[in-house]
């Protein structure tokens, strides 16, 4: 089952990538731009695909090098149609030209996801061939040019982003969220590193809560507890916050995963199909902004939204990819849920596997018992499926990033210690 799910999910990157520049479309709708986060997840998926026999090492290296060469040669500047600025990149790019689209923001967290993919590639492609040497050289140079201090905009924490039209966005990365990877990479920079005070300021905004008699570092959407773990093995290592609470981020994600299952069992909103083996409330597409009266109950539905538990928002939308990405944390809960969702197969069979989301509470005009089903697959969903299954099975990407000097340096600068971090700092690889 896991073989099939991985292969199906990776097919997205095999077919939805512009082979001329390595850009990956955000969704397979046919009109979507590229997402830099999807590119980063694609880069991280290539080593998995090689090890599982989905593609050859030569093809994976070629694809990776094409991507890195594009970003290495792309325009960095204040022009509104550039690809990036100060080493960061715009959230969405024209899939053909690589120019910014939609007047979107220069995204700090999506750039971190892209860089995570580059660093994973640099660790995996360690041969002495010209192509693999160039991969390592480009990844190192692209990572080193990111100006993390500029992204603080004079504050302690990091801003969400910047636009040439309006300057820095008013939002900062505060509260436990997917920015854990961002801060680690920013702290580990050899050129423009974030100060340790930046991480402390971010962690000071955490919220420790007890949900269903289980205490953990709270964030409602499931993806928050997964995304940084795509790259970093947090088992057995602790920062000061986690040392004070006697667990690590891996155990914290396990608790958050089981809280999702408990929420679905209790089903306080009375949504269709929620239960022990049907859950997964996270950032996902949805039926759309509308209100419907269903079985005498007035219900509000949403489009794309970061859904979460137990406080919501929740409208009955289930995201199977969010379940699969929790596999390393709680396999005893996740595997039966995957099997159940695979039997349901909302939206029918597809070469990319699970549809990103479905809502059995929202009536389907055709009468399907699965209700509304998202019509398009998304790179942000497919990547975690590929990689987190592999981290559960072989720990491949975790092992790669354990040997990544910037990641190790960033973790130590954040105050992480113990476990595998007790080993010496890895030696820098030769370009």
Image (spheres, rainbow, N blue to C red):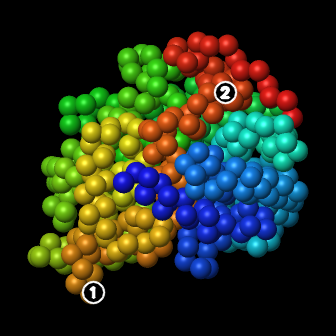
Position of the N terminus by quadrant = bottom left
Instruction: Specify whether 99 is left or right of 199.
Output: right
**Outermost residue, bottom side:** 366
User: Who's the residue at 62% across and 13% down the image?
Assistant: 423
Quick check: 73 left or right of 189?
A: right
In the picture, measured across the screen, residue 392 lies left or right of residue 196, that is left
Residue count near mark 1 (Cα–Cα under 10 Å), binned few <14, some 14–19, many ≥20: few
The vertical placement of 304 against 402, above or below, is: below
Seen at 49% across and 33% down, the residue is: 205
Instruction: State whether residue 430 is above or below residue 17.
Output: above
Along the viewing direction, whichever of 107 and 282 lies nearer the viewer: 282
Task: Give the residue pinned by disc 2.
Answer: 403
Q: Residue 295, how many percent across, how many down?
A: 12, 76
Q: Could you tell me if the residues under marks 1 and 2 are in contact, i.e. CB atoms within 8 Å?
A: no
Q: CA distance from mark 1 to mark 2?
A: 52 Å
The answer, for residue 364, to whether it is visible in the render is yes
- The residue pinned by badge 1 equals 365
Query: Does dot 2 land on a helix, a strand or a loop?
Result: loop
């Amino acid at each position: 089952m896991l073989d099939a799910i991985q292969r199906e999910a990776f097919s997205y990157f095999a077919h939805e990538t512009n082979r001329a520049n390595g850009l990956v479309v955000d969704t397979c709708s046919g009109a979507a731009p590229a997402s830099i986060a999807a590119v980063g997840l694609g880069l991280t998926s290539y080593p998995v695909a090689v090890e599982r026999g989905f593609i050859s090492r030569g093809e994976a290296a070629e694809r990776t090098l094409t991507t890195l060469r594009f970003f290495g040669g792309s325009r960095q500047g204040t022009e509104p149609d550039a690809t990036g600025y100060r080493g960061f990149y715009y959230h969405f790019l024209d899939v053909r030209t690589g120019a910014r689209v939609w007047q979107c923001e220069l995204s700090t967290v999506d750039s971190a996801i892209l860089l995570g993919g580059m660093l994973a590639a640099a660790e995996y492609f360690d041969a002495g061939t010209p192509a693999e040497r160039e991969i390592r050289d480009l990844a190192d140079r692209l990572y080193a040019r990111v100006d993390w201090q500029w992204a603080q905009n004079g504050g302690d924490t990091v801003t969400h982003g910047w636009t040439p039209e309006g300057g820095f966005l008013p939002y900062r990365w505060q509260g436990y969220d997917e920015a854990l990877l961002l801060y680690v990479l920013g702290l580990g920079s050899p050129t423009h590193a974030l100060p340790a005070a930046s991480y402390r300021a971010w962690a000071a905004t955490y919220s420790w809560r007890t949900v269903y008699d289980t205490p953990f570092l709270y964030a409602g959407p499931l993806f928050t507890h997964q995304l940084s773990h795509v790259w970093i093995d947090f088992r057995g290592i602790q920062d000061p916050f986690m040392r004070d609470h006697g667990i690590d981020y891996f155990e914290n994600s396990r608790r958050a995963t089981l809280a999702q299952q408990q929420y679905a069992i209790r089903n306080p909103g009375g949504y269709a199909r929620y239960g022990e083996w049907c859950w997964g409330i996270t950032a996902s597409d949805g039926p759309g902004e509308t209100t419907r009266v269903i079985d005498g109950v007035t219900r509000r539905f949403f489009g794309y939204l970061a859904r979460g538990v137990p406080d919501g928002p929740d409208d009955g939308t289930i995201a199977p990819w969010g379940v699969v990405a929790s596999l390393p944390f709680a396999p005893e809960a996740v595997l039966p849920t995957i099997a159940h969702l695979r039997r349901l197969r909302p939206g029918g069979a597809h070469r990319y596997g699970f549809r990103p989301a479905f809502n059995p509470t929202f009536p389907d005009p055709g009468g399907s018992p699965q209700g509304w089903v998202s019509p398009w697959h998304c790179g942000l969903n497919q990547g975690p499926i590929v990689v987190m299954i592999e981290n559960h099975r072989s720990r491949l990407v975790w092992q790669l990033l354990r040997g990544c000097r910037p990641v190790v340096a960033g973790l130590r600068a954040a105050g992480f210690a113990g476990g595998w971090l007790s080993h010496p700092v890895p030696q820098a690889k030769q370009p």
